[in-house]
Each structure stands twice: as structure tokens, then as C-alpha cells.
Image: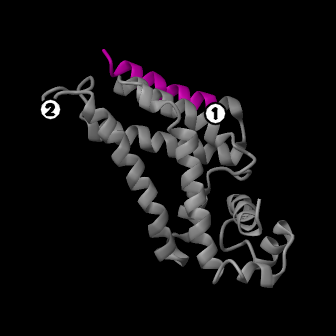
Amino acid sequence: MNLKNTIVHESLKLFSLNGFISTSIQDILSAAGTSKGGFYNHFASKEDLFFQVLNEARRIWRERNLQGLDKIDDPISKIEQLLLNYKESYLLDSENFPGGCIFIMFAVELGDSRPHLSREVQKGFVGLKTMLKRILDNGQSPAMQYSGNDTATVTEIIFNGMLGASVNFSVDRSYEALDKSINSLIDYLNKLRD
């Protein structure tokens, strides 16, 4: 791994643990084993690093969560696989995100103090909701509903359930509680088939 990638990787871990604001340049230099010159040869500023870390976090999120979805046609089964991937491959990824979901950390931390950075994070949440709704919409005719619920409502329930599971897991690190949270979303999805 070259120095730039090492700095991004170590910053990803530090930001997930401590947040962007509470992580100092010195923390990053120590974790990456480099100097200020090594850092500034690759990044114009800590904010420049933020965007590169955000891009890497998005890449990892897609790689972990979308795995195998293209092989599934049924929308409920597709979202169920997304939830299982989210639990097993993403939220439990302590190598990249030892503090839990970095997007949640950024959203909470940056909302008031750095709204321009928070807006960048929010784009990912909007994208996830759009993807969930598109999957659900593709599985039904316009006149049909999922057990009386329209796709916008189901999307909100799944999206907020995913975020809630992530926050709870970040706080208590209980695999049993995480399993229960994700399984309740899967149970909800399966009831939509009736």
C-alpha cells in the first residue's frame, strides 16, 4: 500500500472511531507513520483528505453491501440480501470501521459545525433511499402495493431501520442486538409478501 492509500486507510479507521473533527493531523501522521511533508505531498488539507476518505468509505460500502444483489430478481429477496450483507460484511467490518458506520459518525458530528461536509454525507443517504425504492418499484405494478404499503413508506421503514441498527451497534457492540434488529427488518419484509 502506498503512502497516500495508507493515510486514507488509517484516517478511515480514526474517523470512524473519533470523528473527523476530533481526529487531529498529528493522530493521522502517527497512525500512518509519516510526517507533515508526507501528508501534504498527497493532500492539500484535512478537508481534502475528508473527501478522499468519504470516497473510499463509499467504495467499501458498495463492495460489501451490493455483493450478489445482481443475481436476485425478487425485490424482497434482494433487499433481504442487502440487509444480510449490511450486517455481516459492512457493520462487522472492524478492520475498516472499528468505530462503526462512518457515515453515521459524520452525519451526527458534522451537521452543525461543517454543514458543507454533512451535505456530502447526506448524498449517500439519499442514494440509499433511492436505490431501495427503485428495487421495490421494479417488483410491482403501479396499481399494486406491498401489503397495503406504498413503496415510499416501505423504503422509509427499511432505511430508518438500517440506520437505527447501525447506531445501536456502534453504541453497544452487541452482535445479538444487531442480529435482532436486522432480523426484524427481514421479518417485516417477508410479511409484505402476504
Report the residue that reaches farthest toward the left: 143
Please identify the quarter of the rendering in which residue 191 is found: top left
Q: Is residue 158 left or right of residue 3?
A: left
Nearest the eye: 75 or 36? 36
User: At which x and y percent is residue 12?
Assistant: 69, 60
What are the residue bounds of the magenta stretch? 178-194
Name the quadrant of the N terminus: bottom right
* Residue at 72% from the left image edge and 82% from the top image edge: 41
Q: Residue at x 46, y 67 (%)?
A: 120
Q: Give the numbered dot on residue 88.
A: 1
Q: Position of residue 49 (x, y in %)?
A: 63, 73
Label 1: few (<14), some (14–19) or many (≥20) C-alpha neighbours in 10 Å: some
Mark 2 to mark 1: distance in Å?
33 Å
Does any portion of residue 105 appear in the rendered image? yes
Residue at the image point whose x is 56% and y is 48% from the top: 61
Q: Earlier in the sequence, mark 2 or mark 1?
A: 1
In screen coordinates, is 3 left or right of 89? right
Residue 184: in magenta span:
yes
Where is 37 relative to 173, above or below? below
Q: Nearer the viewer, residue 11 or 176?
A: 11
Dot 1 falls on a residue whose secondary structure is helix
Left-right relation of 91 to 182: right
- Above/below status of 111 relative to 65: below
Residue 174 vertical position relative to residue 3 in the rendered view, above or below: above
Q: Hey, what amino acid is under mark 1?
A: Glu
Asked if residue 190 lies in the magenta stretch, the reply is: yes
Is 186 placed above or below 110 here?
above
Q: Around disc 2, counting alpha carbons within 10 Å, would you say few (fewer than 14), some (14 to 19), or many (20 or more)? A: few
Which residue does the numbered mark 2 point to in the structure image?
Answer: 142
Q: Can you give x and y, in whole percent of width and height, for residue 123 in the image? A: 42, 61
In the image, is 141 to the left or to the right of 108? left
